[in-house]
Amino acid sequence: MTGNQNNTLKQALPGINKQLRKKFDSDDPIRTAVRIGGLRRSGGKRGSRQVPVWTQSTVAVRKVLLLAFPKLKTDPVQRQRAARWAQMIFLYWGRQLTQGQIGMELGMSQFAVNSEIRNIKRAAAGCSVRSGKPRGRRGRPRKIRALSAASVSSAEGSHEIR
């Protein structure tokens, strides 16, 4: 391009942008693709993600969903969230879509997709979704007393439980 053509293009761009803004709002896919960098790359990182074994079995996926959503069969809110998790599991590990692509597909932000996938990984590992710590009883563990043969025989005679 010559300098003269470049100047006329710079002068025409503000008018073109105003016209485009009338046609597209900020929620249109073309605008979100530009915002997340979808048009600058030649392609995403498809196929480079490690796929956990549990995602390849519907029985294992169902176990993870029931662990995270115990009232899945009775509570409609939990059923809806579990359906979203199942869809995200399929898109993230099954189709190997990126988090930005999943966000566009499900109408969520990339941050929300990231946190949901983190929660799915925590639930699959048997940890609490909120804290990431292992599930189990709270508090101090109980003491385990070692019983000797003498204490067992004396306990049988007195019928006391210690």
Image (spheres, rainbow, N blue to C red):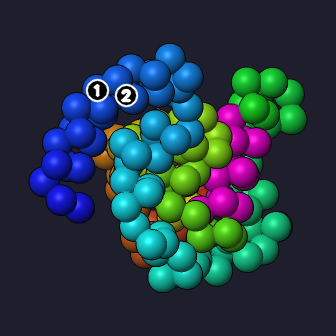
Q: Which mark is residue 17?
A: 2
Which residue shows up at 48% across the image and 82% down it? 48
Q: Is residue 153 above or below residue 18?
A: below
Image position, residue 6 (x, y; %): 20, 49
Looking at the picture, tell me which residue is in the foreground, 10 or 129: 10
Which residue shows up at 37% across the image and 28% down it? 17
Question: Furthest residue to the top?
Answer: 22
Quadrant of image for the N terminus? bottom left
Callout 2 secondary element: helix
Which residue shows up at 44% across the image and 57% down it? 39
Please name the predominant secondary structure of the magenta segment in the image.
helix
Looking at the picture, tell me which residue is in the foreground, 11 or 64: 11
Q: Is residue 51 above or below residue 60?
A: below
Left or right of residue 102: residue 12: left
Looking at the picture, tell me which residue is in the foreground, 59 or 93: 93
In the image, the segment drawn in magenta is 81-92
> Which residue does the numbered mark 1 point to in the structure image?
14
Three-letter code, disc 1: Pro
